[in-house]
Image (cartoon, rainbow, N blue to C red):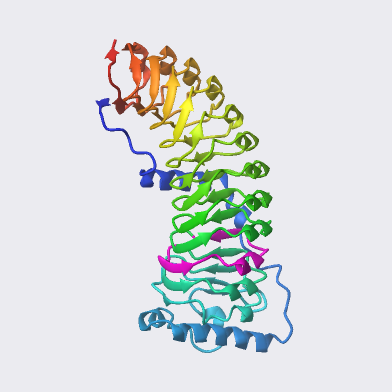
Amino acid sequence: MVSLVEKPVPNCSSVLIRVLLTTIIIILVLAPSQFAISSSFATSPPNMATMMGREAEALLEWKASLDNQSQFHLSSWVGNITCHWVGIACNNFSSISHINLPDYALKGTLHTLSFSSLHSLISLNHSDNLLYGTIPSHLGNLSKLIYLDLSGNHHLSGRISSELCQLTSLHILNLHDNNITGSIPYQLGKLHLLNELILSSNGLTGSIPVSIGNLSNLIILFIYDNNLSGSIPHQLRNLTSFRMLFLYNNILTGSTPACFGNLGNLTLLELCANKLAGSICHEIRMLGSLAWLNFAENNLSGLIPTSIGNLGNLSFFYHSNHKLSGPIPQEIGKLEALLDLGLFSNNLSGPIPTSIGNLTNLSILSLAENNLWGPITSSIGNMKDLTVLESSNFLLV
């Protein structure tokens, strides 16, 4: 049943939709084997017994610095046989390779953990705990680290230290949803093996460093929900492996960069809720893999380019709360994979194009608060899945 509503469908606030969509895309697009963290390549270090003793000593010292409840959760951490401890995995030489303790309610800091004793560590996951304080600079001693996840520790604060950028083996760096402030260090551009860089939902300020353009293996860049300013650097054109770029809820300015035209593998592009201005760049037509495109809640103006019809894989298209003018191009009807189309709160004029009836998979059509006029074509009846129609000054015929 079609619902005629006045209130626009939320965009940046649709957190659940984002999470579900992102999860689906990650599962489908990124082969799990691509990020498999193996310790089979490890070489036997000298004086193994001494090293194992130092590893156990380092972890037990850190455990003792945590609160009583945390120590209870780590009650298996006794003796020197660390490979049997909860959250610990070892390589073929019984040296610690993984410390994975997500959502263990661990409360304390990381400063008492002697990372220099963990020579074989390739994976460190302390996500969704109660860690506080700053990220210690000596974490940069983990030269073999491939995976680092400290996300979801809401009181983890301070800046991203330049020493963290010494982790040149990293493939995944996730600091999402903490209280990290300051600027993104330009030294992150040295992490050439990075596939995922996730710094979202923090208090980061300053501009996006141009050095991110050096991360040629980057597939995911999430730096949304911060206070980043300045323009989107054109050096992002070098990141041709990009699949997901989320920059929403910042204060980015300037225009939508032409560099997007180089990113032919991009699947999700989120620029909602910034201060971008100017017209929609024509290079957008080259993003043939896009499934999600959201430029809502910026200050874009000008026409919707007819080249938008080239984005045949697009499922979600939001260009609401702008100053877009002119007609909705007939080429919109080529986007037959569309599920949601949001163009409300603009200065669009003219009739609704008859080609919109080709969008038979559409579930949400949001056109209210424009200067559109005339009848809605009867072909809208082809949209069997349409549940929400936001419109005004129209007559369904």
Quarter that holds the C terminus? top left
Looking at the picture, how far across and down is residue 328, in whole percent? 44, 19
Q: Residue at x 52, y 39 (%)?
A: 269
Looking at the picture, how far across and down is residue 323, in whole percent? 42, 28
Q: Residue at x 68, y 59 (%)?
A: 190
Q: Is residue 351 left or right of residue 315?
A: left
Q: Residue at x 27, y 17 (%)?
A: 393
Write down the region rendered in magenta.
152-175
Q: Is residue 367 left or right of residue 40?
A: left
Q: How many marks?
A: 0
Residue 97 in view in this figure? no
In the rendered image, the vertical position of residue 248 relative to residue 151, given as above or below: above
* In front of the other: 87 or 178: 178
In the rendered image, the vertical position of residue 217 relative to residue 342, given as above or below: below
Quarter that holds the N terminus? top left
Residue 119 in view in this figure? yes
Residue 159 inside the magenta-drawn segment: yes
